[in-house]
Amino acid sequence: MLMQMNQIMGQVQSGCALAEPVIYSADSINWCFETASRKRSPVVIGCLGMGDFWEEAAELTEFFARKYSQVPSALSLENCREFHTAVKAFRLGFTNVIVDGIREEALLKSIAHMAHSMGGSVELSLELGDDLWEEPERLETLIRRTGIDGLYLTMKISACSPIDSNMVRRSISESQAEEAENRYIQALKKLEEGIHIPLILDGDIFCHMDFLSFTARTIAARIRFERALSAGAVRKAEELISQPETDRRGLTRLQTAVREGYEEKLGDYFQVLNTHNRW
């Protein structure tokens, strides 16, 4: 069943963070719900607000939310950059939007007011190095005046996710990935001292599961995953392809491998974030 973000967060105890897998197809939505059902975990379905798929994704997510009615779930639209996009999202069934690239106080307040009137929530996307991230007092004032419900905090890294140790880091070294992760965590700790609002973190930043678990239990309300899940799917497919020719099973077997890799990685995250066995 689809729920408001504050409702689904209220259903889990402290010391954990919700997982937000970013979907890219009908199959991936199904995989998210099936894994959440198997792990008995709530899940937030994340969808990029680009192209036309996000409209289809809303309908598909509602379908699977009804099919897996025992799974507490929410639906979040990312990259929302215009007021009318937010309105459309809530009408389609999204329960949350992440606003990106908007800093005007009046516009943010209007989006938040509209979202709350439609039973939804609004979060603001901030990248490490953003002036607002570096000025907690100014950010706290913006939060209070606009009524936004959370902050999604990220930073730019290589196109290759550093979180999956089984993938070759084609663009950055392990030491560079660890340095990026440490900068991210230190900036989070500093920001948390002055900001009292749910924080949504970028899980693709993390190189170490221990650090990921720590932030889930102490800092984050929700952690978003995209490249790391794709990396898990790709790894399984590569393992299949590397087998002797007689051990391959064609396209169907390859599709199964991709699904297994995606679900295995997502299931691991449910456990690392401590949201498994919640009902």
Image: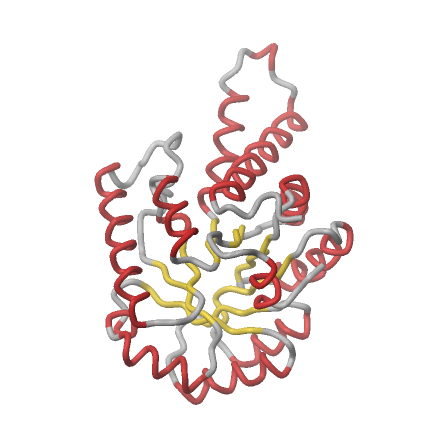
With respect to residue 242, does 42 lie above or below?
Answer: below
Question: Residue, x 56% and y 75% (percent of image)?
Answer: 85
Using residue 69 as the reference point, say whether residue 139 is left or right of it.
left
Residue drawn 58% across the image and 44% down it: 276
Examine the image and state in which quarter residue 192 appears: bottom left
Q: 276 or 5: which is nearer to us?
A: 276
- Asked which colour scheme the image uses, the reply is secondary structure
> Which image quadrant is residue 266 in?
top right
Residue ranking furthest to the bottom: 106
Image quarter where the N terminus lies is: bottom right
Is residue 224 positioned above or below 277 on the image? Answer: below
Left or right of residue 64: residue 79: left
- Residue that appears at 49% across and 68% down: 98
Image position of 146 (left or right of 27):
left
Tell me which corner region of the image, top left, top right, bottom left or bottom right, holds residue 94.
bottom right
How many marks do you count on the picture? 0
Pick the residue in front: 66 or 11.
Answer: 11
Residue 188 percent across, percent down from the top left: 31, 60
Q: Position of residue 229 (x, y in %)?
A: 50, 42
Q: Position of residue 263 (x, y in %)?
A: 58, 37
Q: Is residue 114 above or below residue 180?
A: below
In percent of width and height, residue 278 lies at 62, 48
**In this rendering, is residue 17 above or below 92?**
above
Residue most extreme to the right: 67
Q: Say left or right for 67 vs 250.
A: right
